[in-house]
C-alpha cells in the first residue's frame, strides 16, 4: 500500500491524481452512487450477483459486499449479501436479500431483509416553467410506458415571445413566493376620513412595500361635498356628474363620477360602509404631475355614531334634527 502527500491511502490499482468525470454520475433508479475503492470518485454501485472490485464496490446500502471467494488476491468478485438476510415474497415470486427487480415498467424494487422498497422510474410531476421549457406538460405516447415532458416550444418569433413571457411569469412567481415567505403582509384598516364633507385624508399602516417595512400610507377622501347636502329616501350613495378630482390647486388628469354619502332620512349620521382605493394622476398649474391614492365610496350606512363629523356637518345635522323634531 502506498501513502501519498495528500494522506489519501490508495491501492495499487488507484491513480495518484484520482481523475473523476466533470459531471456528476447518474445512476438508474434504485442504484446508489458510492465512492469507489480509491475514495475519490462517485460510481454506480454494483448490485446483487454483479461483478465487483476495488473500482466498482457493491451497494452497501442494501447490505451487499464483494465476495472474492477463498482467494483474497483476486482482482474481481461477485456481490453477495453480507449476512443471511430474509428473502422477500412479491407477487408470487421469491427474491433474495439485496436483489433488485422491476414491477411492470414504472417501478424499480429491492428486497431489503424481508421488506420490499420501490422507486418510481417515470416522471409523475410537472417541472416548473422555465426559459428553456415555458409551457411544460406530460404527454403519453402509445407503446411507451412513461409519459414525457413536452415544452410546447413555438418556432421563430412565437418561440421567442413564449420564452420571454414564460421567463417573466416564472420570475414573478418565484419573487412573489420569496416575498410571501420572507415578508408576511401586515396591513391595518383605513381610518375614517378626516373630514365628513369636503376633501380630507384617510390613513393606514402597512408593510406591503419592497423594503417590507411598516409605513404610513395616506389617501384623499371625499364623503360628500359641503355645498350640497341632499336627503334621499333610501340609504344609498348619490352619483355625481363627471368631474375632475382636486388636491389643493392640482386636478386629476381624467374625469370621474364619484359616489357620495348623503344624510339619513331619520336624522342619523350617514358614513361610508364600503370603499375602494385607486391611484389617481394629478397635474398642477406649474405643470408638475404626480400620483395619489384616492378613496371611492361604494356603499353607505346610517348610525348614531357621529364622532367623525367636522364642524360644518355638526351644524347641518343640528339644524336638520331640529327640523325633524318640529314635524
Image: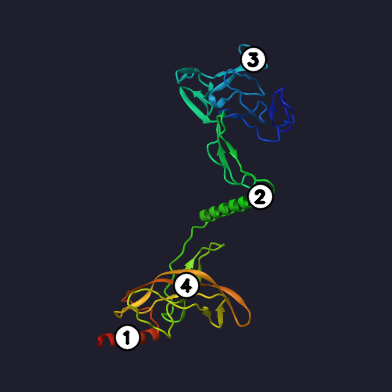
- CA distance for labels 1 and 3: 110 Å
Q: Secondary structure at mark 2?
A: helix
- CA distance for labels 2 and 4: 42 Å
2 or 4: tag closer to the N-terminus: 2
- How many marks do you count on the picture? 4
**Closer to the eye: label 4 or 3:** 4
**Closer to the eye: label 3 or 2:** 2
- CA distance for labels 1 and 4: 27 Å
Q: Quadrant of residue 281?
A: bottom right
- Of the pair 145 and 308, the residue shown nearer to us: 145
Tell me what residue is drawn at x 59 percent, y 80 percent: 284
Q: Quadrant of residue 326?
A: bottom left
Label 3 Cα crowd, 10 Å radius (few <14 / some 14-19 / many 20+): few
Asked if residue 213 lies left or right of residue 324, the reply is right
Label 2 Cα crowd, 10 Å radius (few <14 / some 14-19 / many 20+): few
Q: Identify the disc placed on residue 295.
A: 4
**Closer to the eye: label 1 or 3:** 1
Q: Which residue is mark 3?
A: 72
4 or 3: tag closer to the N-terminus: 3
Q: Identify the disc placed on residue 172.
A: none
Q: Secondary structure at mark 1?
A: helix
- Residue ranking furthest to the top: 70
2 or 1: tag closer to the N-terminus: 2
- Of the pair 320 and 70, the residue shown nearer to us: 320
- Of the pair 136 and 122, the residue shown nearer to us: 136
1 or 4: tag closer to the N-terminus: 4
**Closer to the eye: label 2 or 4:** 2
Task: Tell me whether the residue at label 2 lies in contact with that at label 4, contact meaning CB atoms closer than 8 angstroms.
Answer: no
Q: Which residue is mark 2?
A: 158
Amino acid at each position: 500500500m502506498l501513502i501519498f502527500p495528500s494522506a489519501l491511502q490508495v491501492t495499487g490499482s488507484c491513480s495518484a491524481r484520482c481523475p473523476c468525470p466533470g459531471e456528476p454520475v447518474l445512476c438508474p433508479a434504485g442504484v446508489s452512487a458510492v465512492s469507489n475503492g480509491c475514495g475519490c470518485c462517485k460510481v454506480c454501485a454494483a448490485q446483487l450477483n454483479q461483478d465487483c472490485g476495488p473500482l466498482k464496490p457493491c451497494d452497501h446500502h442494501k447490505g451487499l459486499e464483494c465476495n472474492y471467494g477463498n482467494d483474497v488476491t483476486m482482482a474481481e468478485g461477485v456481490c453477495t449479501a453480507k449476512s443471511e438476510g430474509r428473502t422477500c415474497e412479491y407477487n408470487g415470486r421469491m427474491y433474495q436479500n439485496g436483489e433488485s427487480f422491476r414491477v411492470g415498467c414504472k417501478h424499480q424494487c429491492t428486497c431489503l431483509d424481508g421488506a420490499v422498497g420501490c422507486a418510481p422510474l417515470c416522471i409523475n410531476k410537472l417541472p416548473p416553467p422555465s426559459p428553456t421549457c415555458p409551457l411544460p406538460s406530460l404527454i403519453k405516447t402509445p407503446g411507451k410506458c412513461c409519459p414525457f415532458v413536452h415544452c410546447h416550444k413555438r418556432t421563430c418569433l412565437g418561440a421567442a415571445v413564449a420564452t420571454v413571457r414564460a421567463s417573466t411569469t416564472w420570475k414573478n412567481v418565484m419573487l412573489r413566493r420569496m416575498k410571501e415567505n420572507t415578508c408576511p403582509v401586515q396591513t391595518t384598516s383605513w381610518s375614517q376620513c378626516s373630514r365628513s364633507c369636503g376633501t380630507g385624508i384617510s390613513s393606514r399602516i402597512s408593510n406591503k412595500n419592497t423594503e417590507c417595512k411598516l409605513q404610513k400610507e395616506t389617501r384623499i377622501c371625499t364623503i360628500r361635498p359641503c355645498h350640497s347636502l341632499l336627503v334621499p329616501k333610501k340609504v344609498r350613495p348619490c352619483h355625481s356628474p363627471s368631474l375632475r378630482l382636486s388636491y389643493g390647486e392640482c386636478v386629476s388628469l381624467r374625469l370621474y363620477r364619484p359616489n357620495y354619502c348623503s344624510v339619513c332620512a331619520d336624522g342619523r349620521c350617514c358614513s361610508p360602509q364600503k370603499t375602494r382605493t385607486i391611484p389617481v394622476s394629478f397635474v398642477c398649474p406649474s405643470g408638475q404631475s404626480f400620483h395619489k391614492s384616492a378613496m371611492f365610496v361604494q356603499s353607505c350606512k346610517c348610525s348614531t355614531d357621529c364622532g367623525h363629523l367636522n364642524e360644518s356637518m355638526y351644524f347641518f345635522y343640528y339644524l336638520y334634527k331640529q327640523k325633524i323634531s318640529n314635524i
